[in-house]
Amino acid sequence: MQRVYPAPRKSQAPVKLGSSITWLLVAGAGMILLSGALVMSIAVGALVLYGSGRILPGVSVAGIGLGGMTLDDATAQIESSLAQITVRDGTRTWAISPAQLGLSLDANATALAAQERGRSGGAMLSALVGPDDVAPVVSVDPAIVNQGVKDLAAMVNVQAANATIRLIDGQVTPVAATEGRLLDVDATINQITSAAGQDLADGAIDLVMMSSAPTITDASALVEQARNLLASPLTVNASDPSTIRRWRGRFRPNSGASGSLQKMVQPGQNSASIRGSLPII
């Protein structure tokens, strides 16, 4: 009887742990060297820029990036960009001249402050990588700012609207009330005169506003009155001053009218017809 023996197993090559570890160490060392070289390059570039007198890369004024500019270039850029300033109420914004609010911008002094940021003033790292906003150097004329803010109110104020009704396609439709937005003149004047430069640090002056409530918030009574009125004929008295003639007539509103009631008055005996439009709102 022939015996069957199991086939001999093939021997496996031993895992060379030492070789794998060596490659990992080499790769890690390479990454460290590359990172060190990158950091060194950035440091050298920062030192070169620092010594050049140019404004550091992360510095801006009122949202205007000035990084890498010379003092003269930054001065010109600030003068051009802030020839008009933004005033805002939330998402509503307006562009106006700084002179309207009695503001005088010192562009050169502002550029100098930007140049010094990260050198003698402010953190160097922030000035290098940003964002690092510098407040504009601004002087304020109190007399002009008082009148300027009062004039501004006429532009930014939104009056509250009472609830009302409209006649649309023959149907009485309610219109909801809306709140108003009114400029707080005194508070805005105080804010600008006390810290105009800080207000402009992000490129805009935030107005101090107040909410104004409507006096009528529910139009349901008006709707009912209008519907009752439109359901009945209207009586119109008319006269002609040149002839001292008078007419009296009745009509029904045209259900197809929108915004006004169209009519035909059938006058009394021995008189002519009158046609016209009678607004109801």
Image: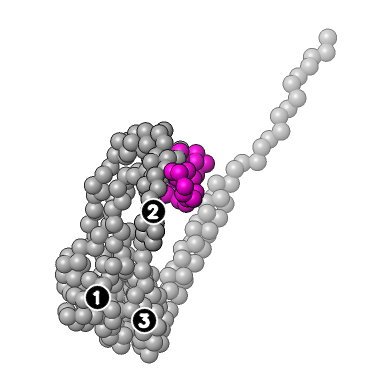
- Asked where in the image residue 146 lies, by quadrant, the reply is bottom left
As drawn, 158 above or below 111: above
Residue neighbourhood size for the residue with mark 3, other residues' Cα within 10 Å, grouped as few (<14), some (14–19), many (≥20): few
Whether residue 206 sits left or right of residue 20 in the image: it is: left
The type of residue carrying mark 3 is Ala
Q: CA distance from mark 1 to mark 3?
A: 17 Å
Q: Percent x, y for residue 259? A: 45, 48
Q: Please tell me whether mark 2 sits on a helix, a strand or a loop.
A: strand
In the foreground, 154 or 207 = 154
The type of residue carrying mark 2 is Arg
Q: Please tell me whether mark 1 sits on a helix, a strand or a loop.
A: helix
Tell me if I can see residue 160 in this picture. Answer: yes
**Magenta stretch: residue 12 in it?**
no
Residue at position x 29%, y 75% in the image: 134
Whether residue 178 sits left or right of residue 270 in the image: it is: left
Q: CA distance from mark 2 to mark 3?
A: 66 Å
- Asked where in the image residue 172 lies, by quadrant, the reply is top left
Residue at position x 38%, y 90% in the image: 72
Q: Nearer the viewer, mark 2 or mark 3?
A: 2
Whether residue 195 sits left or right of residue 261 in the image: it is: left
Sequence order check: which comes first, mark 2 or mark 3? Answer: 3
In the foreground, 109 or 11 = 109
Q: Which residue is mark 2?
A: 245
Q: CA distance from mark 2 to mark 1?
A: 56 Å
**Magenta stretch: residue 259 in it?**
yes
Sequence order check: which comes first, mark 2 or mark 1? Answer: 1
Residue 83, numbered label: 3
Q: Nearer the viewer, mark 1 or mark 3?
A: 1
The magenta stretch spans which residues? 252-280
